[in-house]
Amino acid sequence: MSFSTINSRSVTGIGAYSVCIEVHLSRGLPGFSLVGLPAKAVKESKDRVRSAIINSGFDFPAKRIVINLAPADLPKDGGSFDLPIALGILIASQQLPPDCMQAHEAAGELALNGQIRPIAGVLPMALAIAKEGKSFIVAEANFNEASLVNQLKVLPACDLLTLSNHLKGSLPWNNSASSYATKPIKPQYPDMQDVRDQQQAKRALEIAAAGGHSVLMVGPPGSGKTMLASRLPGLMPSMNPQQAEQTAAVYSVSHQGFTSSNWQQRPFRHPHHSASSVALVGGGNPPRPGEISLAHHGVLFLDELPEFSRAVLEALREPLESKAISIARATRSVCFPANFQLIAAMNPCPCGYYSDPDQDCSCSIEYVKKYQNKISGPLLDRFDLHLEVPRVTTSLLIREATSKAESSADICKRINIAHQYQYRRQNSSNSNLENKTLYSVCKISEDDKLFLEKIMTQLCLSARAFYRILKIARTIADLAQLENIQRTHLLEAISFHRPALGVK
């Protein structure tokens, strides 16, 4: 047989599309042609495959070799096609049985000596292959990541020669594949118990974690804004398997890569204020996920919010509403998920002490207005909770705590109950409530409707603010385990929606 086909995968976004590698050996002058929109890294596989086959003790056929990567109109990138191309050549040259790869798919990069190296994007491939009911041949270093997918048989291989012996049947597959595996570590987060005082801020983060709401914290330097934000992932409910797979798939296709020990751990992304819009939303060619996608099902914390460029901050507005980001390039368009909780922190003025009664502010009124106006009104309107974080007094810090503060585990008990209420009722968090179901879920009395209408008029709040107040009040009622929203819940929601910024 001078023809063979091998199945593999091409990763686009966080999806993995089937690619059929067709290998044909024919008479004529020796040559190696690769067609099917291969990128430069794929074209260079010809030299890697040739050296790997020869150094593994096989004969490289002195024939005209044509390899087609089908479908022909799908761009292919990366070194993951090295292994299936090499196996296709060995099968077509009758050095491997013709049917040895019918039940398998393979992906891996080859070293010149035949070693199989790990690749990026293994998890999306594994998720797609599991639906086909086939087994997946990967490098040993990719075994942990691929084996996270249930109902998938993962076959780790160290080099091309050993893999060939497995496929021939002369060497059984290693039944102790678990020796390659490392168990995921239970997520460890900073504890809320470490935070002194700041009861209002803790309450706001509890509401944010229970309903998936975004938070803007404003306060002087050293008031604990960063410390509070870093503890939000520890308050959020545990990820379900589907959420964990989506988050891991984003990391798998990114330049950062995925570590299996971080399975089901809520991401906490803290980009520097010098980050560009491409670093935040994603980009490149081929497109790669940015910080907002790496924070999928986790927290994106933007410290020193006014120091970010205006273009970067405005790029957040659409993903905050759509929970996804679409990146278009000339040859392809990909969509990355971006369902994150945005937590931002800022000082009220350049010196930081404008709102601090115990410190003298050195900024003029015009300078304070200019600083605060770096944040546009539409972006401010997308924060569910506006929170003023005061400075903790020195005497409180020095004095030993007389009573033990609530731990994250204690707060999580209430949050988990509220979270269960939401998913039983509408199968989503309160922050993702659609307007058509909002009124049936957020029931308030006629008197409270009139009260809310009066407040909306007095504060000149937008329609988006109205819906967000109802959603926050619904979350507060869920934390209190009540079916209907009460006046006290509306008052607390309105107090958190009152802008923390403003020039006196």
Image (tube, rainbow, N blue to C red):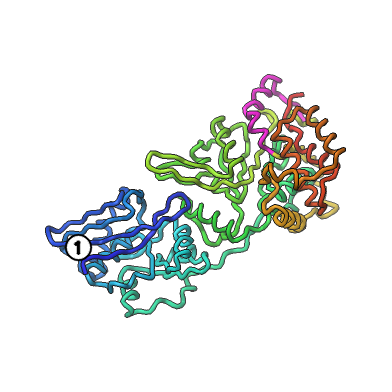
Residue under the image location 74 percent in, 24 percent down: 503
Residue 204 screen position, x and y as percent: 75, 44
In the rendered image of this protein, does residue 86 appear above or below residue 422? Answer: below
In the rendered image of this protein, does residue 436 appear above or below residue 185? Answer: above
Label 1 Cα neighbours within 10 Å, binned few <14 / some 14-19 / many ≥20: many
Q: Is 195 on the left or on the right of 58, as rendered?
A: right
Q: Is 438 on the left or on the right of 78, as rendered?
A: right
Q: Classify mark 1: helix, strand or loop.
A: strand
Residue 331 screen position, x and y as percent: 37, 42
Residue 83 screen position, x and y as percent: 33, 62
Closest to the observer: 504 or 101?
101
Closest to the observer: 172 or 360?
172
Kindly indicate the quadrant of the structure image that contains residue 468: top right
Closest to the observer: 302 or 42?
42
Quadrant for the N terminus, please: bottom left
Amino acid type shown at disc 1: Leu
Residue that carries the numbered disc 1 in the rendered image: 25
Closest to the observer: 498 or 504?
498
Residue under the image location 75 percent in, 36 percent down: 497
Q: Is 343 on the left or on the right of 407, as rendered?
A: left
Image: magenta residue range: 359-383
Residue under the image location 81 percent in, 40 percent down: 490
The stretch drawn in magenta includes residue 376 = yes
> Can residue 408 be seen here?
no
